[in-house]
Image: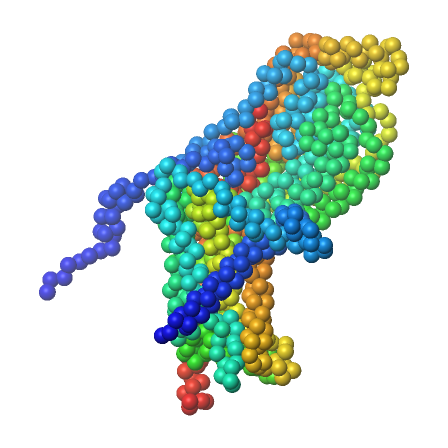
Amino acid sequence: MAEKEVSIADIANRSQLFEEELKGETMTINMGPSHPATHGVLRLKLEMDGEYITKCDPVIGYLHRGSEKIAENMTYTQFIPYTDRLDYLACVHNNVAFALAVEKLAKLDVPERCAAIRVLCCELARLASHLLGVGVYGMDCGALTVFMYTFTEREKIYSRLEELTGARLTNSYARIGGLARDIPDGWLGKVLETIESCERCIDDCDKLLTRNKIFYDRTVGVGVISKADAIAYGLSGPNARASGVTTDLRKDKPYSGYEKYEFDVPIGKEGDCYDRWLVRVVEMKESIRIIRQVVDTMPNGLWYNDEAKRIVAPRKDKVLTSMEELIQNFMIVTEGPQIPEGEAYFEAENPKGWLGFYLVSKGGGVPYRLKIRAPSFCNLSILPKLLVGHLVPDIPVILGSFDFVMGDCDR
Amino acid sequence: MDWTYIFFTVLKAVIMVTIFMSIAGYTVVAERKVASWIQERPGPNRTTLPIILAIPVIGRIVTRLGLIQLPADGGKFLFKEDPFPGHVNKVYFILAPIVALIPALTTMTVLPFGEITRDGVTVPLVLANLDVGMLFILAFSSLGVYGIILAGWASNSKYPFLGGIRASAQVISYELAMGMSLLPVFMWAGGTLNLFDLVEAQSGLLFGCLPKWMIFFQPVSALLFLTALFAETNRLPFDMPESETDLVAGFNTEYGAFKFGLFFVGEYAHVTMGSALFVVLFLGGWSLWPLNIFGLVDYPAGILGAVLSALVFMLKTFCLIFFFLWIRWTLPRFRYDQIMNLGWKRLLPIAIANFVVYAIAMAVYIRFFNQA
């Protein structure tokens, strides 16, 4: 009987001929702009082979409000509430970053107390933003309770910010060359209590998720961004640090007196979703460390620069009693703070990444041009490359680990 | 066959469906209350009627406990507009929620939930004391997934479609592990598939203190069965078919009003049924453990014993339902491919190994030590 030789290699080769036919069709699926995973109004046009993503096309701009153009039509002070609406999870930080940008343009210094309060607010905002980011990240992985725990703590921080600024969400606290008001009596003690309960909550979430096998399996090796990619795509903030990029503007280019405080910058290794989780958790603990130091070393003095008569509005009680201050107040309210001609770029380490303001001034109270470098916008630019090859259930995990805000991305 | 027999059978069936559905319905409320308790918030505590608030103290307590929430939700589902998206396949679209709910109600008929002693004879409280009870349950409960697949298919939309595909793959994979994990249990119980006999086999004490529950003899089987149960009922961490973070609402995205309500109740009916089944199989049914140490082995004869045994059974079932809810609000969710890996590469081999080991051990035992 003649034996027919069949080699496995032959069969494998033959199957390659039909590979195109075997592939079948891909499915186009639209995720967003109204979808629980997309945290706002991000829209992803996905092409999928079964559950695998073969192509991802993000569509942004559903929340575009033209903030940059709006800035050209109002004074510097009037624009501060608009910065609240950029990254609306860390409003105070945006206010401070914008004020610092304008101060850089005007070459204006602020008193030590003002700088310290600004650092305090920024770190409270970072804590609040990360608490929400971490909680929502847990929710995206299916752990719904972590979100409730962190949200409770965030509300407590918002209560502190409310006592300080008068608003829970859109604080508008910073002013060019100062702050809206001084901290109220006994407020620092309340802050210490709040961050203590935050610390307990962070530890709880750490225990619930960090060593959880399911969470570990969901995040390790998912959404890996190499160090080179992170730099090439302009990632910043915790997302870049998780990929091993040692960048933190608070250390690299200290502003507002960050150099006075001791804190560590967590750096990830693998650049996967798990590292991004760890970096945020550690960063919250570091924020708490900074807040403790600021509270301990809070200097006395004024909370605004009273030398710059053409930029900083005087205190209200003085406006009502003295002629000089009344005129000063009138000029600043009607014409805006008088910023000299020139241009300046300033970026601050926002909870989401580098928030940069590029300002061009032709003199007077109104910016000639403002460009905002939004961290979420740059961070999201890697999505088309990152999502390809992942499964659909990975999308919420990756998006959750990015912790972006569409108000920031679309501006 | 006379008419009174048929009448009483139908009456029993109606009573049992009513009780079962109320338990399933109140599981929904319990889920919300447990979730709120775990998450440190009040949960549903305001829905009420003026007539209930008029009752002096109890009215307030009932309102606070959210007990009125269930009729309110049910009423909402009933009176909402019943939408039909233009693109659905109408027949299957209507059929799907019905198919999802019916298996849970059908399996209930063979589930014993207590015993009654009359004239020295102990008989189970059950609608139909089938000799192949467990086979019947396995056969019917696996039909439930057709409801989800049908819903995914009939919705003619992409997210439900993905949910339906996931459900079919997941439930079929875990059915195998579930069936395999149960084989040693019935071997141990003497080869019977009758659930009442199984409960009888679990009464009595081990070493004079531990109950003779199957969970102590078959811990691996119990763990495998419980895991498979989570997957079968599509509960978190296995809730792939409707994982809301990526598939919005999965298979029921296009559903609304009472059709959604049926899916919803169906899920909780499955949870209730699964918990009751676990109690029968592994936790000794209605045998009350701490009491039988003190010599209280049998329930009193007559109606009193029947009610007591049913209450004990329900208590155990509620504990297990609580376990289901607790897990849901604590753990994150698996990914689809991880669930398949777990089912095929971990649970199934362990179940087969468990079965083989028990089979050999029992064969050796019977051959050398026990000639019976």
Q: Tell me the residue at 51%/27% (across/down).
A: A62
Up-down: is B109 above or below A121? below
Residue that protrudes farthest toward the front in the picture: B3
Q: Is residue A10 visible?
A: yes
Q: Is residue A229 visible?
A: no
Which of the pair B341/B289 is nearer the observer?
Answer: B289
Q: Position of residue B94 (x, y in %)?
A: 38, 47
Left or right: B96 in relation to B60:
left
Q: Position of residue B47 (x, y in %)?
A: 63, 47
Quadrant location of the C terminus of chain A in the rendered image = top right
Up-down: is B319 above or below A205? below
Q: Tell me the residue at 49%/64% (across/down).
A: B15
Quarter of the rendering containing residue A107? top right
Q: Tell me the residue at 58%/53% (across/down).
A: B29
Which of the pair B52/A312 is nearer the observer?
Answer: B52
Q: Position of residue A232 (x, y in %)?
A: 51, 31
Up-down: is B177 above or below B56? below
Q: Position of residue B363 (x, y in %)?
A: 41, 82
Count how many numbered circles sit on residues in the image.
0
Left or right: A255 in relation to A67:
right
Residue that protrudes farthest toward the right in the picture: A321
Up-down: is A240 above or below B179? above
Quadrant location of the N terminus of chain A in the rendered image = bottom left
Q: Tell me the residue at 69%/18% (across/down).
A: A78
User: What colouring does the structure picture have?
Assistant: rainbow
Which of the pair A123/A329 is nearer the observer?
Answer: A329
Left or right: A402 in relation to A22:
right
